[in-house]
Image: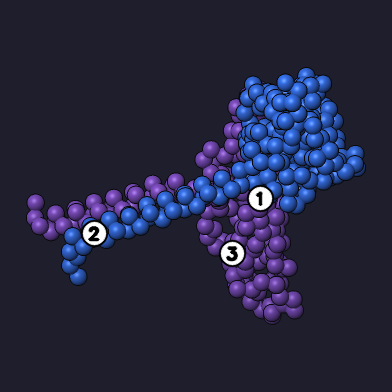
Chain colours: A blue, B purple
C-alpha cells in the first residue's frame, strides 16, 4: 500500500501535538498537587510519636520554640553528614529557643540499634520513631534527608530536601528562630 | 531525486520528528518514578538433573544512582541481596555477588563506600534434584536494594526477579527411572 506523505506528516504532527498537550496537562496537574502538598507557610501537622527512650513526644510540646524537624534513617549516608551539624546547632541555638527533633524512618531496624546509632552519632536531641501517616501529612517524603523548619508559632517557614550545605541549614534555623508572633511581640 | 525517494525521506523525517518529540517530552514527564535498579530479560537456562549449574542474572543501576554492594562498607547500610523461592525439588545454592566498587561521593568525599553502579551481574547456582521431572520451572524472588544519588537516599526497595530453568535428564541417564512421587510446586 502506498502511503501519502502529506497524510504521514499530518498524522505525525497531530500525534506530537497530542503528546505535548498531554504532558503539559500532566505537568499542570503535578504543579497543582505540589502546591497542595507544600506545607511551607502552613501550621506544621502535629503528631504524637514514641521516642527512643519510650516517651511520647508531640510536636506541639515544643510550641514557643523554633523546631528543626529532621527525617532521617540509619541507612541514609547523607543524613550522617548533617547530624553533627544539628548537634552543633542544638548547642549553639538551643539557649535561644531552638529544638532539633529527629524522626527516624527505619523500618527493619530495632529501636535498640537505632538508639545505639544515635548514641554513636552523639545526638543531643530527641529522636522519635516514625509511624504511618506522619510523612504523608508533611507532603510525602520520597527521599532522605528531609528537614522542616518550624517557627515558634508552629508554622513551617522552610523545608530542605536532600543534603545541602551547613550554611543553608543554619540560615534556615535563624529564619525559624526569627519568625513567629512571640518574636514579633518581643520586638 | 525521485518522487518516491522524496516521499520516503519526508515520511522518515516526520516520524523521526515525532519520535524525538515523544522522547523529549516523555523525559520531562513530572513525577515519573525512576526504577533505580532494573533486571535484564532472563533467558531460559538449561540445567541437568543433579548437576549444579550457575545461572547469570543481569541488573543495571540507573545512571546517577548507586546501591550498596552485598557487603557494604559501613555497619548500618542496607546490602543488596537476592532472595529466591525455588520449587521444592530445585535447590538454590550460593548466590555469587560481585565485589563492590569502592567509591566516594560528594556527601562524604573522604569516605569510600562499597557500591554497585551501572551494570552488575549475580550468579545463582541451581541444582535440580535427581527426582525432578524434566521441563521448565520458574524461580521467583526479589532483589532488595537501597539506592542513593549524590545528595539523597531513597527508601529500600524490592525488585521482583523471575527466571526459568529447563531441567533435562542427566547425561547418560537411561530413562529407566519412573516419575517421582513428589513433584515441584511450580511446573510450567
Query: At x 76% / y 29%, what residue is drawn?
Result: A182
Say which of B140 and B174 sits in front.
B140
Please state the horizontal and vertical placement of residue A1, each as a whole percent of the image. 19, 70
- Distance (Cα) linking label 2 and label 3: 45 Å
Q: Secondary structure at mark 2?
A: helix
For residue A16, say whether it is visible. Answer: yes
Q: Earlier in the sequence, mark 3 or mark 1?
A: 1
Measuring 74% from the left and 37% from the top, which residue is drawn there? A154
Residue at figure coordinates x 71%, y 34% from the top left: A150
Q: Quadrant of the C terminus of chain B?
A: bottom right
Eye-nearest disc, 1 or 2: 2
Residue nearer the viewer, A23 or A67: A67
Q: Looking at the picture, do discs 1 and 2 lie on one chain?
A: no
Write down the residue under mark 2.
A10
Which chain letter goes with mark 1? B
Residue B157: mark in rendering: 1
- The residue indicated by pointer 3 is B164
Furthest residue to the left? B2
Amino acid at each position: 500500500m502506498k502511503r501519502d506523505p502529506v497524510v504521514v506528516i499530518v498524522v505525525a504532527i497531530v500525534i506530537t501535538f497530542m503528546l505535548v498537550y498531554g504532558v503539559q496537562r500532566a505537568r499542570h496537574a503535578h504543579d497543582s498537587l505540589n502546591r497542595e502538598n507544600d506545607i511551607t507557610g502552613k501550621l506544621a501537622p502535629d503528631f504524637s510519636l514514641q521516642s527512643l527512650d519510650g516517651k511520647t513526644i508531640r510536636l506541639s510540646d515544643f510550641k514557643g520554640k523554633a523546631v528543626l524537624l529532621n527525617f532521617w534513617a540509619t541507612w541514609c549516608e547523607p543524613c550522617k553528614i548533617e547530624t553533627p551539624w544539628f548537634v552543633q546547632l542544638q548547642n549553639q541555638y538551643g539557649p535561644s529557643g531552638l529544638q532539633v527533633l529527629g524522626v527516624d524512618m527505619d523500618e527493619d531496624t530495632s529501636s535498640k540499634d537505632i538508639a545505639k546509632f544515635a548514641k554513636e552519632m552523639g545526638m543531643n536531641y530527641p529522636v522519635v520513631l516514625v509511624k504511618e501517616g506522619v510523612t504523608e501529612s508533611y507532603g510525602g517524603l520520597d527521599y532522605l534527608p528531609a528537614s522542616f523548619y518550624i517557627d515558634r508559632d508552629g508554622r513551617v517557614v522552610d523545608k530542605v530536601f536532600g543534603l545541602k550545605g551547613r550554611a543553608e541549614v543554619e540560615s534556615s534555623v535563624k529564619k525559624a528562630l526569627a519568625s513567629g508572633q512571640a518574636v514579633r511581640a518581643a520586638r | 531525486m525521485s518522487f518516491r525517494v522524496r516521499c520516503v525521506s519526508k515520511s522518515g523525517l516526520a516520524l523521526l520528528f515525532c519520535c524525538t518529540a515523544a522522547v523529549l517530552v516523555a523525559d520531562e514527564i513530572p513525577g515519573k518514578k525512576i526504577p533505580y535498579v532494573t533486571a535484564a530479560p532472563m533467558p531460559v537456562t538449561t540445567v541437568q538433573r543433579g548437576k549444579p549449574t550457575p545461572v547469570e542474572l543481569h541488573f543495571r543501576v540507573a545512571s546517577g544512582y548507586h546501591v550498596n554492594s552485598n557487603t557494604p562498607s559501613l555497619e548500618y547500610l542496607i546490602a543488596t541481596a537476592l532472595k529466591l523461592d525455588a520449587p521444592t525439588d530445585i535447590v538454590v545454592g550460593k548466590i555469587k555477588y560481585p565485589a563492590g566498587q569502592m567509591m566516594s561521593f560528594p556527601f562524604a568525599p573522604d569516605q569510600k563506600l562499597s557500591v554497585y553502579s551501572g551494570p552488575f551481574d549475580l550468579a545463582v547456582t541451581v541444582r535440580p534434584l535427581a527426582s525432578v521431572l524434566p521441563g521448565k520451572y520458574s524461580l521467583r524472588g526479589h532483589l532488595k536494594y537501597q539506592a542513593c544519588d549524590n545528595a539523597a537516599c531513597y527508601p529500600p526497595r524490592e525488585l521482583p526477579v523471575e527466571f526459568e530453568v529447563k531441567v533435562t535428564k542427566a547425561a547418560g541417564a537411561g530413562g529407566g527411572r519412573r516419575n517421582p512421587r513428589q513433584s515441584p510446586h511450580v511446573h510450567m
